[in-house]
Image (cartoon, rainbow, N blue to C red):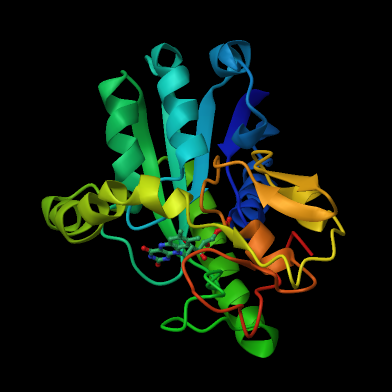
Amino acid sequence: MKILTAFYFTGTGNTRYIVDRLCGKLSAEFRVRTYDVARGGDYAAQMRESDLILLAFPIYGSAPPIPMREFVRAHAKHFAGKRVVIAETQYFFSGDGAASLGRAVERYGGKVVGAEHFNMPNNLCDCKTFPVRNGKELEKTLARADGRADAFAARILRGKAKRKGFRLLPHAVGRYCQRKYFLRSEGEKRKKLKVDAARCVGCGACVGKCPVGNLVLEEQKAVPLGKCVLCYRCVNLCPRKAITLFGKEPPSAQYKGPVLK
Ligand SMILES: Cc1cc2nc3c(=O)[nH]c(=O)nc-3n(C[C@H](O)[C@H](O)[C@H](O)COP(=O)(O)O)c2cc1C
């Protein structure tokens, strides 16, 4: 049986949800393996053995998250000659989200044979412009995403998947309307993660769940170490709503993603 290896990054579970859905369908033809790139490590052997590689990630201002960019850079030489499909998750818009990474893969000699964007629930819970929706609305969004994932998987199996985001217009929109500005301030944004010491009770939920080990407990308070990758997992999970990132005030509602409860 052919081998499909999925490498993904997820902050609040949306991307992991799509990976599971796609892999479930693709397992009709592939033996599937999945790896969370936030764990780090060398996957040269897994890439060598793969007939198809799936890269999946949430989009941040039309840019892939830092752990995914680092993974692709570190494994650049292993993409040569490989067939790659890309699944990008977003709240509502990214010009060329999937292609923003897909182009790098092709520069390294990989062949992107499919790329798709999946609209998923918003996880920016402390950002007033985009409200978080749980409950029925969340279920509806996931049901639509299921349909899109099933259709994408079917097209991959038929060898006829689309390459979302690779055309000139989406590329120009993604690059010049979003990515350029987002990446310019990414370093500053990473320093903005704040724990309100008055609210924090030192339960350690954020410390244990941060995908990159950015939080530690000091004197019963969570303290960020400056390695934040902007994934919003801790902001959404904190039982005391003590953590903020882009917003100045604690979130009124947190996003309870489909995987990370
Ligand atoms: C820092 C940050 C930036 C984001 N930027 C965008 C964006 O530009 N466009 C969009 O539609 N969604 C954006 N989102 C929403 C997420 O991409 C979306 O909710 C995604 O499905 C989250 O996936 P995850 O649960 O796997 O982390 C952003 C989220 C974060 C945390």
What is the total number of numbered labels drawn onto the structure image? 0
Give the quarter of the figure containing the N terminus. top right
Foreground: 46 or 209? 209
Residue 143: x and y in percent read 61, 75
Residue 29: x and y in percent read 64, 36
- Please report the residue visible at 67 percent of the width from the left and 67 percent of the height from the top: 196
Foreground: 257 or 129? 129
Foreground: 218 or 89? 218
Give the quarter of the figure containing the C terminus. bottom right
- Please report the residue visible at 54 percent of the width from the left and 22 percent of the height from the top: 51
- Please report the residue visible at 41 percent of the width from the left and 45 percent of the height from the top: 64
Foreground: 166 or 37? 37
**Observer able to see residue 12:** no
Q: Is residue 65 above or below residue 129?
A: above
Would you say 179 lies left or right of 45 here?
A: left
Q: Is residue 182 above or below residue 103?
A: below
Q: Is residue 199 above or below residue 37?
A: below
Residue 103: x and y in percent read 27, 34
Residue 213 occupies quadrant: top right
- Please report the residue visible at 52 percent of the width from the left and 30 percent of the height from the top: 53
